[in-house]
Image (tube, rainbow, N blue to C red):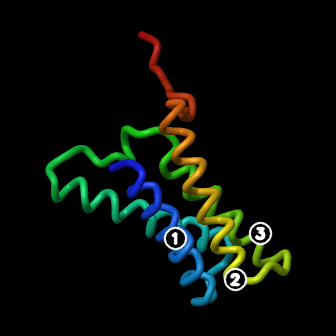
Amino acid sequence: FLIPDAAGLAAFSVAGTMVSLVAGTPWLVASFMGVVTGAMGGIFRDLLCNETPIVFKSPLYATAAWLGSLGFIVLLNGGVSVTASAIIAGLSIFIVRIVAIRLDLGLPKFQLKQ
């Protein structure tokens, strides 16, 4: 189910960013709203299935969404059409997420020394 999850993350992250920009929010807020919109679908799914949300245990989940949302904003500000920007940003989120899953890539984790 990780491939459909990556597709949903990509689609809803871009959609959340777009709606937030249309509402007039600043670019940074819009990028975070894209992450929240994309990630919440997976969180709700996992909670309904009584599982630990994948966003808390899987590599580069929110990071992929945020980078794609930022990419979408940069492309729009660079004069690229909304449709092309959405497709490029969505594909970038999807590809980063799939590569992170396949290669088990993640951000460094903090470990407390005892």
Q: Point out the residue furthest to the right here.
A: 78
- Give coordinates of residue 65: x percent, y percent: 55, 58
Mark 1 vs 3, N-terminal side: 1
Q: For mark 3, does the 10 Å Cα neighbourhood hold few (<14), some (14 to 19), or many (20 or more) residues?
A: some
Q: Which residue shows up at 56% across the image and 34% down it?
A: 107
Q: Which residue shows up at 50% across the image and 35% down it?
A: 102
Residue 74 image label = 3
- Give coordinates of residue 67: x percent, y percent: 64, 56
Give the secondary structure at mark 1. Answer: helix
Q: Nearer the viewer, mark 1 or mark 2?
A: 2
Q: Which residue shows up at 60% across the image and 74% down it?
A: 30
Three-letter amino acid code of the residue under disc 1: Met
Measured in 3D between alpha carbons, the distance from the residue under mark 1 to the one under mark 3, in whole angstroms, is 16 Å
Q: Nearer the viewer, mark 1 or mark 3?
A: 3
Looking at the image, residue 24 sits to the left or right of residue 15; the answer is right
Measured in 3D between alpha carbons, the distance from the residue under mark 2 to the one under mark 3, in whole angstroms, is 11 Å
Q: Quadrant of residue 17?
A: bottom right
Q: For mark 2, does the 10 Å Cα neighbourhood hold few (<14), some (14 to 19), or many (20 or more) residues?
A: some
Looking at the picture, tell me which residue is in the foreground, 47 or 113.
47
